[in-house]
Image (tube, rainbow, N blue to C red):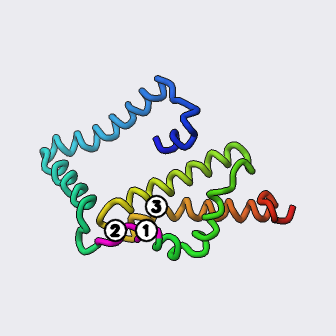
Amino acid sequence: MSYWACTRCKTRPSLKELVVIAGAVGVVSGLWYGLETLWHGTWFITEFVKYQIRLLSTGDAGHGRPFYFHFVVLLFGCFPASFLAIRSFFIVGRSTTRQQDFTRWMTVLFWVVLVLFSIVKTKTVLYSSLCYFPITYLAAFHMHSVITGKLSGTRP
């Protein structure tokens, strides 16, 4: 949904694609949760939901940190890639369509993970680790744009 919103809703999945996606989600989650419920009852699912709500609403296990915790961890913990990646958020239309598409996916992944885990009250460094891949990709994309002269003010 986030990616679709970032593309300004230009492309819409067909009914066939939606059915395939819904079917895949249903089969995978049905196998996982269905078998678990069948074998052990509803205890696991009930406890899992309670645990997720507790992580969202309280600083569980002494891991309560301020809202900006993951921003700081990623900015300084992934240095220098994080500083290079910042510029890549503003590189628009200077690459192939496939590269633009992948860059958009990486940007969406980065922001969804960062915002989601900044909202959650329980914060550990592990939660923001999914941002490492987008940060390093975006930093490499920026360096590639600098080296190939695709940024204004750089060599041709």
Q: Identify the residue shown where x is 61% and y is 70%.
A: 83
- Asked if the residue under mark 2 is in contact with the one under mark 1, i.e. CB atoms within 8 Å, the reply is yes
Which quadrant does the C terminus fall into? bottom right
**Please, what secondary structure does the residue beneath circle 2 have?**
loop
Over which residues does the magenta segment extend? Answer: 64-71
Give the amino acid type for the residue marked by disc 1 in the picture: His
Q: Position of residue 146 (x, y in %)?
A: 76, 64
Is residue 67 rendered magenta in the image? yes
Q: Which residue is mark 3?
A: 130
Q: Which residue is mark 1?
A: 70
Q: Residues within 10 Å of mark 2 (few under 14, many from 20)?
A: many
Q: CA distance from mark 1 to mark 2?
A: 8 Å
Mark on residue 123?
A: 2
Give the amino acid type for the residue marked by disc 2 in the picture: Lys
In the image, 49: left or right of 103? left
Among the 4 quarters of the image, the one containing residue 148: bottom right
- Asked if the residue under mark 2 is in contact with the one under mark 3, i.e. CB atoms within 8 Å, the reply is no
- Hey, which residue is sitting farthest top in the picture? 15
Q: Where 100 sits versus 83, above or below?
A: above
